[in-house]
Image: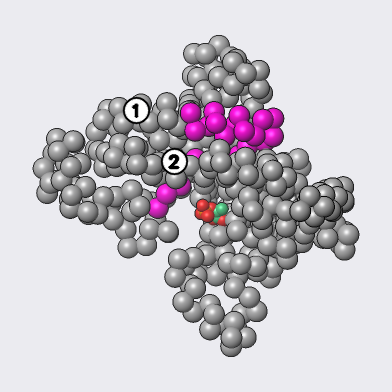
Amino acid sequence: SPELIGNFEVLMAWADEIRKLKIRTNADTPKDTKQAIIFGAEGIGLCRTEHMFFEESRIAVVRQMILSRNVEERKDALEQLLPMQRQDFIEIFREMGSRPVTVRLLDPPLHEFLPHEEEDIVKLAKKMNISVSQLKNVVAELKEVNPMLGHRGCRLAVTYPEIYEMQVRAILEAAIILKEEENLTVIPEIMVPLVGQLTELKYIKNLMIKTANEVIQEKGVKIDYLIGTMIEVPRAAITADEIAEEAEFFSFGTNDLTQMTFGFSRDDAGRFIGEYVEKNILEKDPFQRLDRAGVGKLIKIAADLGKQTRPNIKLGICGEHGGDPSSIEFCHQLGLDYVSCSPFRVPIARLAAAQAALRLPQK
Ligand code: PEP
Ligand code: MG
């Protein structure tokens, strides 16, 4: 009823006055973006780009690009993808207006891009002008026993730098188009996934800057952007002082950080975690509520180390925990700048952040 909605708005306005944390959302479509804004999101903390590559009209080209051993062929495929990717970002940036948007460069487990059905393999082999058995060999070589610890995130970009080059180009071209045609200033925050070491980030950042400079020069339009990284590999957390030399922001990916800190597979652990909770070995499922003693401790270490190197480094969290009240309380205590959660969790996050601010001082 209108009365209920009115009361809800009043409550939310109180919460917004009190809370210290900003609330962003995880969104990768214009529809989710719009929804999140209605719920009060103040930015996008994580725009995953994987789904964009799985769209029906794109997946065949994406597969061809991943499976081709020929750099020129890969570049051709990416040229076909560029206008679509640019349009993705134009639409999301436009919805968000002047609010900040963090776009994460591609982070798929590689196996999700491999064709499995015989029919797809036959079609693709024909398109690529190679034999079915040749293609099957390539697919077999790319298969991994443990894809979530495998060739994904920035590791993929070390092998296929053209992918990130295409994405950085699409992001900046989108920002330039909006500036030129709609007078909208977007400062994209471009995020590198699964970084574990400074040298990885340096390598990727170099190619990002090279591409960005090319685009800016070609178009003759100056665009500001930030480069930052996910902190989701324990090694990155422990060496965050080094990583911060090259990162303007950190976003804690607590899904992977939980997986790798516990050594629990995020895809399979559900099979035994219930039993652990029943038998009091675990108090809660650590994928649902941030484990403060372990994963939380790593986040604190990383936040402190990051600030040592770069006192004004922007800090956020974008794993599922960003929508969990108890985890939000922890983020408040640590003094993070924002939490990012799914659109429908945004109102809960606004309230939880206010409750935390009422109850607890920041450290
Ligand atoms: C994470 O690992 O917490 C994260 C946000 O990234 P993804 O879930 O896409 O791996
Ligand atoms: Mg992750």
Q: Position of residue 294 (x, y in %)?
A: 64, 68
Question: On the picture, is 167 further left or further right than 138?
Answer: right
Tell me if the residue at label 1 has its CB under 8 Å from ligand 1.
Answer: no
Q: SS for tag 2?
A: helix
What x and y, as percent, mark residue 5? 78, 51
Query: How crowded is the residue under tag 1: few (<14 C-alpha within 10 Å), some, or many (20+)?
Result: few
Q: Quadrant of the C terminus?
A: bottom right
Q: On residue 80, which mark appears?
A: 1
Secondary element at image label 1: helix
Q: Is residue 145 left or right of residue 244?
A: left
For image coordinates 38% across by 44% down, the residue present is 54
Residue sitting at x 75%, y 46% = 22
User: In this rendering, is residue 86 above or below 310?
Assistant: above
Q: Specify start and end residues of the magenta stretch as a single range.
A: 87-109
Q: Which mark is residue 52?
A: 2
Is 32 in front, or is 175?
A: 32
Q: Quadrant of residue 322?
A: bottom right
Judge left or right: residue 348 versus residue 176. Answer: right
Q: What's the residue at 58%, 67% (across, down)?
A: 287
Magenta segment includes 88:
yes
- Other residues around mark 2 within 10 Å, as few (<14) / some (14–19) / many (≥20): some
Q: Of 96 and 245, which appears nearest the observer?
A: 96
* Residue 300 position (above or below residue 39): below
